[in-house]
Image (cartoon, rainbow, N blue to C red):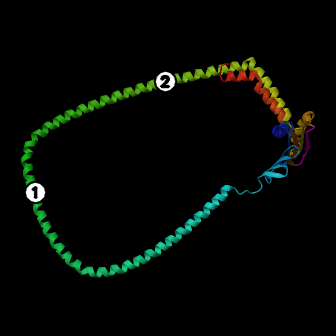
Amino acid sequence: MLHILLLILKIIGIVLAIIIGVLLFAIILILFVPVRYRVNAEGEWGKDEPFHVEIRVTWLLHLVNILLSYPNASYIKARILIFTIFDSSKPRISKDKGKSQRKESRENRKKRADKKNKTEEMESDRITSNINGEVSDNDIDDGRNDNTDNEKNEDIDNTINDNINKKESIKVEDEYHGDASGTEAEDGNTREVRDDAEEKDSLWIKIKNLFAKIVSLFLKLLDIIRNIEYTITSICDKIKKVIGNIGYYAEIIQGELFKEVFGFSKNQLFRVIRSIRPRKCDICLTIGTGDPASTGQIFAIYGMLYPFIGRNVSLQADFEEMIIKGNLKIRGKVTAFTLLIVALRLYRDKNIRQLLKMLKREDA
């Protein structure tokens, strides 16, 4: 049993060692194998599509290859070993399109079924209407004779009721006029007294309303004055706060700590730029402005800058036509190890941490 346990532990250790070795190898490849890039551009000024740019990014002996082309047949293609992971030039049928097509087919089926049901209902309604029409015609002929006799009896009853209603209305009007003539003399004096009291009450109500309006206007003016005071004081407080912040940050910028951090971060930035900058840059241009004098001035400036850019830039003059034509080739590489070192140095620097705390106004 002990021999079997040792054998199992040995196998587990070998598997773990292989996994750790693979992970370390992958980390070393990612950190130290550079990502190489190439940029090729060519074109002529004045055309519909003046420039054509092609960017290629490769890693680990072209095992990972990314290609971008613009604007002629613009596409992005990514490939690992032989397998293409992404290709924008090929049309893709997404899942959403398949779902939408299924939904459309279901909706069409529902519409067809609804149309069939509607046509069947229309036919059944037509049949029932025809049957009902035939039955109603027979009933109408039988009922005509009965309706004539009933109409005559109804006319006689209506005339009798109208005469009775007229007599009752005449009696009610006579009684009302008689009572009204007797009460008018008694109510004349009381109306005058009521009118005087109502006039006094209306004047008092008007006076009260005017006084209430004056008081409300006075209160509104007080509120406006108070709001103006509050706004002025709040604006002054904000201005004081802004001035204090400007003075605080100005002292930080003028201090020695900021200068040390700025110098250190500048050096690290230049180190990143040196690692990213292209190793090879070839620019070939043919320039012509249509005016020999102006083209001569351009090449005079090029002659002054030739010691600095002469290795990478070559210009050719065209003194007859107005043309700008050329091509560009750039090659470079980027290693993740240098970027990681710069990031660690910036993260571990004490002065940067202290400066960040001071900018956030935290306790240093």
Q: Secondary structure at mark 1?
A: helix
**Could you tell me if residue 156 is visible in this image?**
yes
Using the rendered view, name the quadrant where residue 241 is placed: top right
Q: Position of residue 141 (x, y in %)?
A: 29, 82
Marks counted in the figure total 2
Q: Position of residue 40 (x, y in %)?
A: 86, 46
Q: Earlier in the sequence, mark 2 or mark 1?
A: 1
Q: Secondary structure at mark 2?
A: helix
Q: Which residues are magenta?
A: 311-320
* Residue corresponding to mark 1: 172
Answer left or right for 175 relative to 138. Answer: left
* Residue corresponding to mark 2: 230
Q: Amino acid at mark 2?
A: Tyr
Q: Amino acid at mark 1?
A: Val
Determine which of the numbered discs, if any, sits on residue 315 in the image. Answer: none
Q: Quadrant of the C terminus?
A: top right
Relative depth, front residue between 85 and 89 = 85
